[in-house]
Amino acid sequence: MSGLIAVIDIGKTNAKLILVEDEGGATVWSVERPSPAVAVTGFGDLSRQLDVHGIEAWLIGQLAAAPQKHRIRAIVPVAHGAAMVLVDGEGETLLAPDYEDGCFDRLGAAYRRVRRPYAETLSPALPAGLNLGTQIFFVQEALPEVFLRTRIILTYPQYWSWRLSGVAASEVTSLGCHSDLWNPAAQTFSDLVRDQGWGALMPPLRPARAALGSLRQEVAEATGLPADCAVICGIHDSNASYLSHRVARPEGEAFSVVSSGTWCIVLAKGADLARLREAEDMLANVDALGVPTATARFMGGREYATIAGEGTAPPSVAGLAAVLKADSVALPSFALGGPCQGRKGEMLRADGLPPEGRAALATLYCALMADLILDRLGAAGAILVDGPFAANPLFPGVLQSLRPADPVAAGGTRGGITAAVLWLAGAVPPPEAPAKPLPPLAEAEALRSYRDRWRRMLTA
């Protein structure tokens, strides 16, 4: 009988537990909960951290209640980037900073003096704690007592594999995600890690698909899972979305993945790394095979929610028509990062839009941002949309209308990570069908004209 793979998917907004068949990848059960940051005291200016304790209690409880848990043969952690957990010599979790905490900006100038040049890391300088090096530097300088107790620094997916298996590891997809800690060309830690003396705190490098070991006895007893259930090292979430297509398509094929969630991250296989520009939040993500991949992103989920407002109406063709008729416009930026850093977001002629119109404006804005990023990366080939934007009734069609020469396909709504999970757990992912262009919207020509005006407004 085939087995099940348990996927722990910890996003910035929600945490999910998903069970998939290891033959074919069908989802048999899933559950989720919010994953907000929690307030902390006693850490100086740092006021919030990731809810690692709450998520773990929920996770153990859900694994214990999971159907067919006796069939679970492997657990694969998937988690968001720019996140780390500091652990002491006794295995106690000391601190799990939240990259949105405003405290990191206080030492921003000092950190910029020690971080390595963009040419070495292809990791752009970002606000708050979006560079993982910023967080480590802050703890080192502002919380020396915590730093002195630290014996292991774990990136977020590997924190969960460590909690489950007891084996600590470092892994390139999280290290190569605008962390400042990785040199993609040399395929090793950056000189920042050496210069700051952080190397001894970094566990051994292991591949994302490495089986670190079986479940710790306490976890097996608390959950009732098989004692020989393997714990896989794990992977950065957007890299998992990209990997699903990477392992299911021909090696030499150029394509792009638009991975959506709290962040909308565009990874362009085959794009020239020389096109990357630090000021535009462009970076070289490192995939699970260690290959640097041209990437750019914006905080699409957060910006969508800001533009759409509190209404729950889904975007619609009628809403899009209302946007075009009113010539309503949303201009960046409404959140951290992105290709238009330094611009303050604004909406023009949007007050009279109905709820479905505001949702359509938010969708159009996100499609325009993705289109802009694809152009700046020099992306070629199929465009594969994963995550919530794949389920958005307008987004794939709007993006196809903006880019008629490139086939746009909508993938999985859970981040499109199933093929990656199968590959990571040693199973065979199903082949991916070639992307066929979506039918263009009736408003395609008007949307391209709107796009041209929108881009001119960005440079005005």
Image (cartoon, helix red, strand yellow):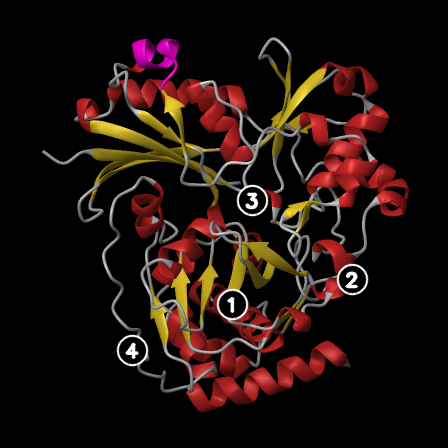
Q: Is residue 28 left or right of residue 193?
A: left
Vertical position of residue 209 compared to residue 53: above or below: below
In the rendered structure, find residue 436 and report the number of the disc placed on it.
4
The one of 419 and 209 positioned closer to us in this rendering: 209
The one of 129 and 207 positioned closer to us in this rendering: 207
Q: Residue at x 33, y 11 (%)?
A: 222
Discs 3/1, front = 3
Residue 219 magenta: yes
Q: Where is residue 37 shown, x and y percent of the image? A: 59, 31
Q: Where is residue 216 shown, x and y percent of the image? A: 39, 14
Residue designated by label 3: 172
Q: Secondary structure at mark 1?
A: strand
What is the CA distance from the residue labelled 3 to the residue labelled 1? Answer: 18 Å
Q: Earlier in the sequence, mark 3 or mark 1?
A: 3
What is the CA distance from the residue labelled 1 to the residue labelled 4? Answer: 18 Å
Q: Is residue 182 left or right of residue 362?
A: right
